């Protein structure tokens, strides 16, 4: 067991997979010699050689397009899109190609690729380094979508993703890379070395895709969150003193509906939280599912706390980011109604 | 007074429109045999002219001339002729089947048969094509069963794609034919990726990407050339310039560039233009490019100059956007007739044998069609299961899709 940041955990996952399977290759912008702008691939080129970990031209459609071709050949590419905000040029390749190759060819060809991308805000990255585009992936049948919230899950889920026979979007909340950021930007963040989920096995292990984890048991209200917002929700529960049950989805697609339904059936109240914009966000899907499956158990309408329906601003980051105060107010609202 | 007048936008127009006399005076046709054949390890800078010329082997008399000639035996040429005739007969029957309502859609190859039929013969088993919807010759020339193609076109109970994909969007890993998307240009960069993978694994197999003149305007075309050039991928990048992108003439995608092949020059990729209606020239150039790839010398860009005689698909009428007689005026002729003439000149063929072969091939196609139709057509007979809608989205069906399948009653 080692203490790892989330950066070290995802690096360790790739390292383990590359060591076990020669067909795993890693590439993307700046990922080769330099080791990635967030250093997630540091040392991999030196260890595995430059034909298994290399720099790519600044062309997201090219990175994903070539990865699809490599997967058709039989490799297992794990590529990095430098920021989730840069994935749009690859969207055609992801939605109309990667997601459908198995289906349209009836399994004659498959597409076992992983597309890693740092997601979310909290680093003063402005409009083009802060987005949370997960709903653009969950809307695409054929993709799997993962958003880990800690180093232990990040490694276990990334290993599962690389070993998965289908294309997986792996969104890494960049504000969590170095510690469990809870939205209190005015305070220094606790490093992962001081958090139990920073304990990460050095070898191979995997976490099944499609299984949520309850981060805080509670009886008053269910909070459904993923990524950075898990830690914000935990802080909000402590600060309001409301006995919230906090579900960390980990996988958005496939979704662990059973865990959600069990919890909301028990609490009768539900708050859905994400950083992404409100309208047509993944929260809309979660609310619909809660309504379909838990309607007769609900005491109050489901509440959503999300980013505003505006582009992600720069200077006003902390008025945009749904921090613990806003989540806390939503918890109170869900309890008072 | 300002020295500059107001700006105006340039919108290119084809030389002629419906009602006009066809005019291909802008297509400069060099004499057959006049373009040199460089060594495969030539520096790309040394052969820049080849991106602006047209490599031709068969001359007007039907003789094979020049440095690109002499690669194929009588038997190989007769096989090539049979493949092209088979593709033409297949197209004719399937076009009719579409009109009879046996399928929703069809795309024919009329006039372009040499491109995919000859190219396939320059590849080896194990190589991988990433085709568009107009390269069925790759399958025919690799002896993929016609019945399977028809099962796919009819979306019947034996459709290899289980009814999920549009007609003619075949797939066959075994025959080196990547699943056709129906999207444009996406496959081009995938071909580069496949080739990179083969090089990463120190394999001996190569890839070929296919794109039309119109789709070279897509950004994936640019990405493909960057990646192919950067990593010297063992890939042949084919551009089939059949002059028309549905109703849009090739000048709209080509812009100010002299030729489509010339797009390769800025990437340092050897770029050749070839007479796409000349089976021998297509084969010779494809083999040259394949040898480059196999010798780890990197990618080659090839522009096949040809003409789409038929409509884009069964959904458009060319007489609405180009002169009706334009195909007759096309200066590079018909690929089947040209090869036939050459074989007769070689003493290996005759008009009688050709007529007999035509009848035999049509009979084969009709027999295959009967067999396919016995397993259903789009609206009649055997069809894929409704369960097939839900299966194969993922390797393992996730719970939400299972719930939806149950809701649909399956």
Image (cartoon, coloured by chain):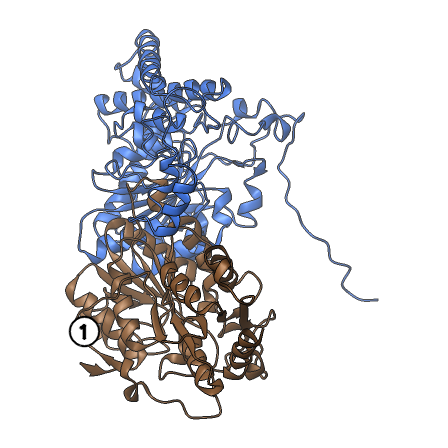
Chain colours: A brown, B blue
Quadrant of the rendered structure where residue B113 is? top left
Closer-to-camera residue (A254/A69): A254
What residue do we see at 50% from left, 58% from top? Answer: A295
The quadrant the C terminus of chain A occupies is: bottom right
SS class, disc 1: helix
What residue do we see at 36% from left, 37% from top? Answer: B388
Q: Is residue B376 visible?
A: yes
Q: Is residue A41 visible?
A: no
Closer-to-camera residue (B68/A94): A94
Residue farthest right in this picture:
B1
Using the image, name the chain to which the residue with label 1 belongs: A
Badge 1 crowding class, 10 Å Cα cut-off, few under 14, some 14 to 19, many 20 or more, is few
> Residue A197 at what x, y percent from top left?
28, 80
Closer-to-camera residue (B400/B84): B400
What residue do we see at 28% from left, 28% from top? Answer: B141
Closer-to-camera residue (A270/B344): A270
The quadrant the N terminus of chain A occupies is: bottom left
> Residue A100 at what x, y percent from top left?
38, 47
Number of numbered callouts drawn: 1
Dot 1 corresponds to which residue? Answer: A47
Asked if B180 appears above or below A234 in the picture, the reply is: above
Quadrant of the rendered structure where residue B164 is? top left
Quadrant of the rendered structure where residue B25 is? top right
Residue farthest bottom in this picture:
A187
> Residue A324 at what x, y percent from top left?
50, 83
């Amino acid at each position: 067991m080692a203490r790892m940041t989330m950066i070290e955990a995802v690096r360790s996952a790739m390292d383990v997979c590359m060591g076990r399977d020669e067909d795993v290759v890693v590439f993307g912008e700046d990922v080769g010699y330099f080791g990635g702008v967030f250093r997630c691939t540091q040392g991999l080129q030196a260890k595995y050689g430059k034909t298994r970990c290399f720099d790519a031209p600044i062309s997201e459609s090219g990175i994903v397009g070539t990865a699809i071709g490599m997967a058709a050949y039989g490799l297992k590419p794990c590529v990095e899109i430098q920021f989730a905000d840069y994935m749009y040029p690859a969207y055609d390749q992801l939605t109309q190609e990667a997601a459908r190759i198995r289906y349209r060819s009836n399994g004659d060809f498959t597409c076992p690729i992983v597309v890693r991308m740092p997601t979310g805000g909290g680093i003063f990255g402005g409009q083009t380094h802060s987005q949370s585009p997960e709903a653009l992936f969950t809307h695409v049948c054929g993709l799997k979508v993962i958003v880990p919230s800690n180093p232990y899950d990040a490694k276990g889920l990334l290993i599962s993703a690389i070993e998965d026979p289908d294309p997986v979007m792996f969104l890494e909340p960049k504000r969590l890379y170095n510690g469990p950021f809870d939205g209190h930007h005015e305070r220094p963040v606790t490093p992962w070395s001081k958090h139990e989920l920073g304990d990460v096995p050095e070898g191979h292990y995997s976490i099944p895709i499609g299984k949520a984890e309850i981060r805080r048991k509670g009886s008053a209200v269910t909070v459904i969150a993923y990524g950075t917002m898990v830690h914000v929700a935990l802080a909000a529960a402590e600060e309001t003193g409301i006995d919230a049950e906090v579900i960390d989805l980990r996988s958005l697609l496939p979704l662990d509906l059973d865990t959600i339904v069990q919890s909301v059936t028990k609490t009768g109240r539900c708050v859905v939280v994400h950083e992404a914009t409100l309208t047509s966000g993944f929260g809309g899907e979660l609310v619909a599912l809660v309504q379909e499956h838990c309607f007769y158990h609900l005491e109050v309408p489901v509440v959503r706390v999300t980013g505003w329906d505006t582009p992600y601003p720069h200077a006003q980051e902390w008025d945009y980011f749904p921090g613990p105060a806003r989540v806390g107010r939503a918890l109170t609202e869900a309890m008072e109604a | 007074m300002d020295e500059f007048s107001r700006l105006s936008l340039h919108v290119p127009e084809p030389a002629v429109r419906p009602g006009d006399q066809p005019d291909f005076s802008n297509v400069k046709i060099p004499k057959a045999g006049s373009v040199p054949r460089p060594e495969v390890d030539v520096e790309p800078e040394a052969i820049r002219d080849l991106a602006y010329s047209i490599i031709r082997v068969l001359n007007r008399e039907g003789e094979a001339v020049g440095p690109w000639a002499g690669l194929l035996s009588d038997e190989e040429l007769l096989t090539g002729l049979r493949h092209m005739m088979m593709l033409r007969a297949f197209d004719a029957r399937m076009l009719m089947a579409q009109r009879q309502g046996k399928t929703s859609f069809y795309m024919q190859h009329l006039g372009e048969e040499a491109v995919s039929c000859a190219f396939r013969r320059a590849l080896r088993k194990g190589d991988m094509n990433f085709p568009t919807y107009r390269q069925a010759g790759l399958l025919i020339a690799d002896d993929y069963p016609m019945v399977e193609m028809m099962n796919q076109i009819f979306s019947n109970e034996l459709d290899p794609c289980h009814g999920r994909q549009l007609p003619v969007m075949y797939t066959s890993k075994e025959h080196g034919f990547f699943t056709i998307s129906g999207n444009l240009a996406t496959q081009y960069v995938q071909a580069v990726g496949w080739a990179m993978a083969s090089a990463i694994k120190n394999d001996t197999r190569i890839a070929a990407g296919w794109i039309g003149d119109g789709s070279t305007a897509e950004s994936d075309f640019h990405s493909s050339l960057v990646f192919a050039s950067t990593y010297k991928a063992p890939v042949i990048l084919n551009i089939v310039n059949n002059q028309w992108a549905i109703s849009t003439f090739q000048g709209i995608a080509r812009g100010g560039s002299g030729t489509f092949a010339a797009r390769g020059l800025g990437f340092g990729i050897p770029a050749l233009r070839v007479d796409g209606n000349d089976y021998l020239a297509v084969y010779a150039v494809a083999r040259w490019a394949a040898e480059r790839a196999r010798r780890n010398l990197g990618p080659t860009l090839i522009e096949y100059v040809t003409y789409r005689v038929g409509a884009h698909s069964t959904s458009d009428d060319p007489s609405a956007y180009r002169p009706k007689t334009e195909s007759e005026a096309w200066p590079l002729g018909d690929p089947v007739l040209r090869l036939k003439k050459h074989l007769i000149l070689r003493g290996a063929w005759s008009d009688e044998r050709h007529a007999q072969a035509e009848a035999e091939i049509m009979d084969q196609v009709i027999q295959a069609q009967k067999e396919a139709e016995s397993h259903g057509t789009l609206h009649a007979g055997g069809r894929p299961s409704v369960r097939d809608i839900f299966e194969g989205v993922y390797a393992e069906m996730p719970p939400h899709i299972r719930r939806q399948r149950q809701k649909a009653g399956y």
